[in-house]
Amino acid sequence: MRLTLREAAAALNCTEKTVLRWIAHAGLPTVRLGGLYHFNRAELMEWAIHHGIGSTALSCELEPEQDGPGGPEGKNGDCAQVSALAGALRAGGIMADAPGTTLPEVLCSAVERLLPESSDTAAADLATDRELLLAMLLAREATGVTAVGGGVLVPHVRAPLVLGDAPRILLIYPAAPLPEAAVHTPDDQPIQAVFVLASPTVRAHLTLLALLAAALRDADFRQAVLSRAPEAAILQSAAAAEHQHQSAAKRFGRRP
């Protein structure tokens, strides 16, 4: 899915001049054909997350999830807010103390969560599916890892993991932080939290990626994640970050 220069600027919430400057000096990936710049949407999002830039203009095909009485409150005390990001995190769940000292070992622990046991799937078929999924994750690990700094990793950004019939974000906490020797990071900080995205479509993947990129810029959400706060607190901070992000986009006349 290709974007023009104008569309890329809108997606990155900046001017076209800024996009051109990032192309020249910050390695923003693009292809120039016939004098015009063209951008791959997934590559754009990968670059944005790596540089701490939250996108606001990707169209959303996710159905937001209604927050219950324990959900985040707005400025007027209104709890009836919705959050697609919190819904995906709730669907994916949190895996604490995943064993392993390397990223492939940690990702191995995620396979059973992504493909749980089901009465509709024979044990042999499930084992085969898990083996194939693990092979897919490990094959992409070399080219699809994005360390965003501050101890957070988002694998498989450029190559979406299309899986299941609902968007999910699995938050994994390694039993011990992964050292820089195991996973290259921009700030040499060990990896404390890994987000794995699984989406039914590529477009849903890009939407989740945009929401997560924006949320990771929110200090409260990052603190909740890195401090291993209770799941309810992480979901609440995710929803609050998403709503704040959407409100800011509306104030500046942009589409969230």
Image (cartoon, rainbow, N blue to C red):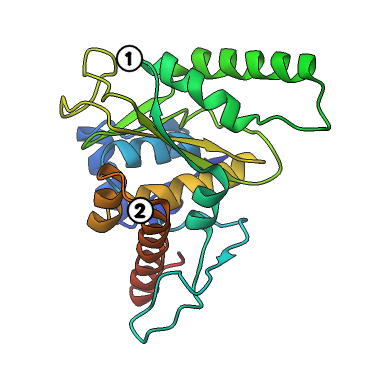
Q: Which mark is residue 214?
A: 2
Q: Position of residue 10 (x, y in %)?
A: 40, 57
Q: Secondary structure at mark 1?
A: loop
User: Which residue is found at the position 35% from the left and 68% from the top?
Assistant: 244
Q: Position of residue 59 (x, y in %)?
A: 55, 57
Q: Quadrant of the C terminus?
A: bottom left
User: Which residue is found at the position 17% from the left and 28% from the top?
Assistant: 189
**On the rendered structure, is 127 left or right of 237?**
right
Q: Position of residue 63 (x, y in %)?
A: 63, 61
Q: Residues within 10 Å of mark 1 (few under 14, many from 20)?
A: some
Of 149 and 123, the residue lying toward us:
123
Q: Give the mark count.
A: 2
Of badges 2 and 1, nearer the viewer stands: 1
Q: Is residue 134 visible?
A: yes
Does label 2 or label 1 sit earlier along the sequence? Answer: 1
Of 116 and 19, the residue lying toward us:
116
Q: Specify the amino acid type for callout 1.
A: Thr
The residue labelled by disc 1 is 101
Q: Secondary structure at mark 2?
A: helix
Q: In the figure, 194 relative to 137: above or below?
A: below
**On the rendered structure, is 96 left or right of 112?**
left
Of 93 and 158, the residue lying toward us:
93
User: Which residue is found at the position 30% from the left and 54% from the top?
Assistant: 221
Q: Position of residue 68 (x, y in %)?
A: 53, 71
Q: Specify the amino acid type for callout 2.
A: Ala
Of 178 and 216, the residue lying toward us:
178
Q: In the figure, 129 relative to 115: above or below?
A: above
User: Which residue is found at the position 35% from the left and 14% from the top?
Assistant: 102
Hey, which quadrant is residue 51 in on the image? top left
Residue furthest bottom in the image: 76
